[in-house]
Amino acid sequence: MANEKSMTTGKHIVVFGLFLQIVFFGVFVITSGLFHQRITRSPTAASSAVPWQKYMYALYAASGLILIRSVFRVVEFTGGNNGTLASHEIYLYLFDGVLMLGVLVGFNIVHPGDIIGRKAQNGGVILSDMESDGEGLRSGRK
């Protein structure tokens, strides 16, 4: 078994990593918000052709759920193995399972695959520039 010192060191490393995750994820959310603000103020031709706003709101909702989950994980680890959050499974189900289920359902309802990596061509959709010659993967060429 691990001694008390190495367990404490491991706990500190995990909590530090979780705080770092929250900081960088927060930077990502702020960057996304700045992008949203700027593209709304000065739309491009490409942004006018796609209903991208609903995808940004789905991203914000998912980000909120993930941030709540990350804060829960920090509180769980700082409480120790015998803490209330670590010793009762219901909290794990609520603050981990249900929140991630919300992210999954949200991105299935507003699926980003509808706008990422696809180009409209004559009423059809191609998946990459390799297929733009009309042949591509449909004819077996790579």
Image (cartoon, helix red, strand yellow):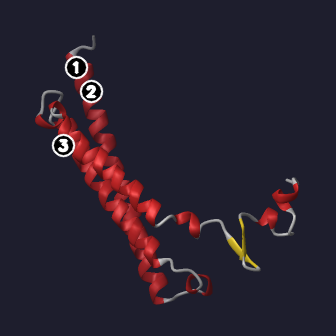
Q: Of callouts 1 and 3, which one flags the residue occurring earlier in the amino acid sequence? A: 1
Q: CA distance from mark 1 to mark 2?
A: 6 Å
Task: Bin the neighbour count of mark 2 within 10 Å (Cα to Cα): few under 14, some 14-19, many 20 and up.
Answer: few
Q: Are marks 1 and 2 in contact (CB under 8 Å)?
A: yes
Q: Residue at x 36, y 67 (%)?
A: 60
Q: Of callouts 2 and 3, which one flags the residue occurring earlier in the amino acid sequence? A: 2
Where is residue 74 drawn, in percent x and y?
23, 43
Q: Residue at x 50, y 89 (%)?
A: 42
Q: Residue at x 88, y 57 (%)?
A: 139
* Residue receiving disc 1: 5
Task: Tell me if 108 is positioned left or right of 96 in this view.
Answer: right
* Residue receiving disc 2: 9
Discs 2/3, front? 3
Q: Identify the element where label 1 is drawn.
A: helix
Instruction: Determine which quarter of the picture holds residue 11.
Output: top left
Where is residue 52 drawn, in percent x and y?
50, 77
Q: Residue at x 81, y 64 (%)?
A: 131
Task: Bin the neighbour count of mark 1 within 10 Å (Cα to Cα): few under 14, some 14-19, many 20 and up.
Answer: few
Q: Which mark is residue 75?
A: 3
Mark 1 residue type: Lys
Q: CA distance from mark 2 to mark 3?
A: 17 Å
Where is residue 117 drawn, in percent x and y?
65, 65
Q: Quadrant of the N terminus?
A: top left
Q: Are marks 1 and 3 in contact (CB under 8 Å)?
A: no
Task: Tell me if 127 is positioned left or right of 69 in this view.
Answer: right
Mark 2 residue type: Thr
Instruction: Determine which quarter of the picture holds residue 36.
Output: bottom left
Where is residue 110 drawn, in percent x and y?
46, 67
